[in-house]
Image (cartoon, rainbow, N blue to C red):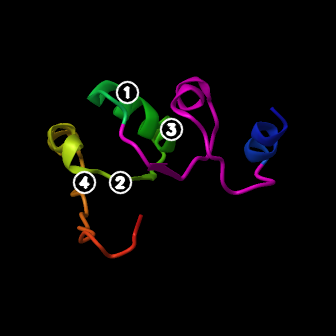
Amino acid sequence: METLKRFKNEEIDVLIATDLAARGLDIENVKTVINFLLPNTLKHYIHRVGRTARAGKTGRSISLVGENERLLLKEILKTCKVPAKMRIVPQGTGFL
């Protein structure tokens, strides 16, 4: 709770949270959400990344997507209001 308070007060710049926390937090001025794992559904994805767009503000979402998440990624791309930028990381590059 102390870390969450410090993040809300902009005393720290990064908050790493589980999916459970991501659904239950209401924090203003979140500029970027990074998804290490995509949520299971489009609805949950929109809810999670919507943290960056409260009250008409803009933000960005960065998602690391594997082959198993391809169908969900296609759904997400259909809902994008701005063009998505994609980067492909070749296997064996030591990224993960």
* Mark number, residue 44: 1
Q: Could you tell me how far apart the alpha carbons at marks 2 and 1 are, in whole angstroms?
A: 16 Å
Q: Nearer the viewer, mark 4 or mark 3?
A: 3
Span shown in magenta = 10-38
Would you say residue 27 sits in the magenta stretch? Answer: yes
Percent of width and height locating residue 45: 36, 34
Please tell me which of labels 4 and 2 falls first in the chain: 2
* Mark number, residue 82: 4
Label 1 secondary element: helix
Res 82 quadrant in image: bottom left
Res 12 quadrant in image: bottom right
Q: Please state if 57 lies on the left or on the right of 2 as rendered.
A: left
| For the residues bearing labels 4 and 2, Cβ distance under 8 angstroms | no
Residue farthest toward the right in the current orientation of the protein? 2
* Mark number, residue 64: 2
The amino acid at mark 4 is Val
The amino acid at mark 2 is Leu
Q: Residue at x 81, y 54 (%)?
A: 11
Q: Residue at x 29, y 27 (%)?
A: 41
Tell me if residue 34 comes above or below residue 19 in the rendering. below
